[in-house]
């Protein structure tokens, strides 16, 4: 494949060597606990990748570096000229119109590189999310920067576009900061790896795979230590109970309440035991044991606690609707572009992967498919992007759930790697967290058909693995659109491939 390679612009003569973060703390106004507390970090030239579960603070860190958010404490230097390319494609970039009407050699190279079409001017609302992402990246590449931060740059992009973006990012000479769930991109770009784990920021001077290896070894040791500590805590718990019983018996022994008024000999015996400190010994042992118990609990808080992952699909599924099918047809996508397809059917238990280049009509076909199959409320459909307004409606619906249902939903979200309670309290949840909440809400209805449009977009790596394993075990029918080749190969039992047949037409080829 031939790639056009350009050198992305940095401010001439003022290239910086690093971004320095010292004593940085930040807490969202609605949150009880800070998301960062006193972190120190140096981010050097080259590409540093930031990983962590959804809600760990990856995007928050980017916003602090770009000055979109202001830190409560601490200092960031080296971030005077920052360009930040956000992960959401809901809103067009501020500099989009200026870029589209700039006719310099550099601007044309970037437009050619990312396949930006003149017809896209003023057409943001009708562009596919993949086309929006390419425009968004083009504007970011075009602006001069010492620090370029890109948040999920391959979301929505087909494989050809992903390869083009990779080549462009490789040519950047400043401080590059990347947040992505794309394993191939992380491995190809990373020179340093930053992991955000339970509020702690860990830095590795190596590419992602080696950093992950080192972290896994640390985690394995932590699990062993935690297991030993939990065993010791149980022993201490038994000792505390035993010492409490001793203290209770001692109090009874040294009590004069049951001694007769004229039994002076017994009273003298008790006074002698109190005077020699025998009444204090058991109490001191109890206090010492409780102190050890408290100290051990405190030390255990510093260890990462791993939660069980993976979803068990329970409940009865309606089978009488299967198989479902759409008849052979041709539909208009936009501006005369058409999509033709043969009769396509779906059996219970089948997992159909849908792939194809951006603009081939995948999302349009899925909407057509949903309209044609009569499933009433028995299916779960999650689009590739969720607007802020839709997210707010989702939060309102979840908060209105009965306690039992809400508890079940929280468990599902936790098993996808996020804290649902913290998510609902957050004023700015990440798109990945919202997606998990939407998936969990849909699963409460025990659907017999699940339709997912780009399910791995915005999801962290651990959650993708968990979702993949869960969907493998799902007994219903599944249709999913994805540009993640690994996810496609691991999950699909059948493949609907969208291909260009002529200049303004596409077709679907079914691969069994």
Image (tube, rainbow, N blue to C red):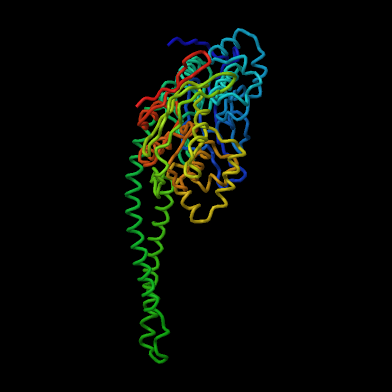
Residue 314 showing in the rendered view: yes
Percent x, y of residue 177: 51, 25
**Residue 458, above or below 357:** below
**Residue 285, above or below 259:** above
**Residue 509, above or below 23:** above
Q: Quadrant of the C terminus?
A: top left
Which residue: 35% across, 59% down? 236
- Left or right: 89 with respect to 50? right
Which residue: 37% across, 29% down? 494
**Residue 394, above or below 286:** above
Between 78 and 112, the residue placed more toward the observer is 112
Q: Quadrant of the N terminus?
A: top left
- Left or right: 331 with respect to 300? right
Which residue: 59% across, 10% down? 108
Between 120 and 1, the residue placed more toward the observer is 120
Location of residue 82 (image quadrant): top right
Query: Residue placed farthest to the bottom in the image?
Result: 262
Between 220 and 331, the residue placed more toward the observer is 331
Location of residue 88 (image quadrant): top right
Percent x, y of residue 272: 37, 79
How many marks overall?
A: 0
Percent x, y of residue 364: 53, 28
Residue 42 showing in the rendered view: no
Percent x, y of residue 156: 50, 26
């Amino acid at each position: 494949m031939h790639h056009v390679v350009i050198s992305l612009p940095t401010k001439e003569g003022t290239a910086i060597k690093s971004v320095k973060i010292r004593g940085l703390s930040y807490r969202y106004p609605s949150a009880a606990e800070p998301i960062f507390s006193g972190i120190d970090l140096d981010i050097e030239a080259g590409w540093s990748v930031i990983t962590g579960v959804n809600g760990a603070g990856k995007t928050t860190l980017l916003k602090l570096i770009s000055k979109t958010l202001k830190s409560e404490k601490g200092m960031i230097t080296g971030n005077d000229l920052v360009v930040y390319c956000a992960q959401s494609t809901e809103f067009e970039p501020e500099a989009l119109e200026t870029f589209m009407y700039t006719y310099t050699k550099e601007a044309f190279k970037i437009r050619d590189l990312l396949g930006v079409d003149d017809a896209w001017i003023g057409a943001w609302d009708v562009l596919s999310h993949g086309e929006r992402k390419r425009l968004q990246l083009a504007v970011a590449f075009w602006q001069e920067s010492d620090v370029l931060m890109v948040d999920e740059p391959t979301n929505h992009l087909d494989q050809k576009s992903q390869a083009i973006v990779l080549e462009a990012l490789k040519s950047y000479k400043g401080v590059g900061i990347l947040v992505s769930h794309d394993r191939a991109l992380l491995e190809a770009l990373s020179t340093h790896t930053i992991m955000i784990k339970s509020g702690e920021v860990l830095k590795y001077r190596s590419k992602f795979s080696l950093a992950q290896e080192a972290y896994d070894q640390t985690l394995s040791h932590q699990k062993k230590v935690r297991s030993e500590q939990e065993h010791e805590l149980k022993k201490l718990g038994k000792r505390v109970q035993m010492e409490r019983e001793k203290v209770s018996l001692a109090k009874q022994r040294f009590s004069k309440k049951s001694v007769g008024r004229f039994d002076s000999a017994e009273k003298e015996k008790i006074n002698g035991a109190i005077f020699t400190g025998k009444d204090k010994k058991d109490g001191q042992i109890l206090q010492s044991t409780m102190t050890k118990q408290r100290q051990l609990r405190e030390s255990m808080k510093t260890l990462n606690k791993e939660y069980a992952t993976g979803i068990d699909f329970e409940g009865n599924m309606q089978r009488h609707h299967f198989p479902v099918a759409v008849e052979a047809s041709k539909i208009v996508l936009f501006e005369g572009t058409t999509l033709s397809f043969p009769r396509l059917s779906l059996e219970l238990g089948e997992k159909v992967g849908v792939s194809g280049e951006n603009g081939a009509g995948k999302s349009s076909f899925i909407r057509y498919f949903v309209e044609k199959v009569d499933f009433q409320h028995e299916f779960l459909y999650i689009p590739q992007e969720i607007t802020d307004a839709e997210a707010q409606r989702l939060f309102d619906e979840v908060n209105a759930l009965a306690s039992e249902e809400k508890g079940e939903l929280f468990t599902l979200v936790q098993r996808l790697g996020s804290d649902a309670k913290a998510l609902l309290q957050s004023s700015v949840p990440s798109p990945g967290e919202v997606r998990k909440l939407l998936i969990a809400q849909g699963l409460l209805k025990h659907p017999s058909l699940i339709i997912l449009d780009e399910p791995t977009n915005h999801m962290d790596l651990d959650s993708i693995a968990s979702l993949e394993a869960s969907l493998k075990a799902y007994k219903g029918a599944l249709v999913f659109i994805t540009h993640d080749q690994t996810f496609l190969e691991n999950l699909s039992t059948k493949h609907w491939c969208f291909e260009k047949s002529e200049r303004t037409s596409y077709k679907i080829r079914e691969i069994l």
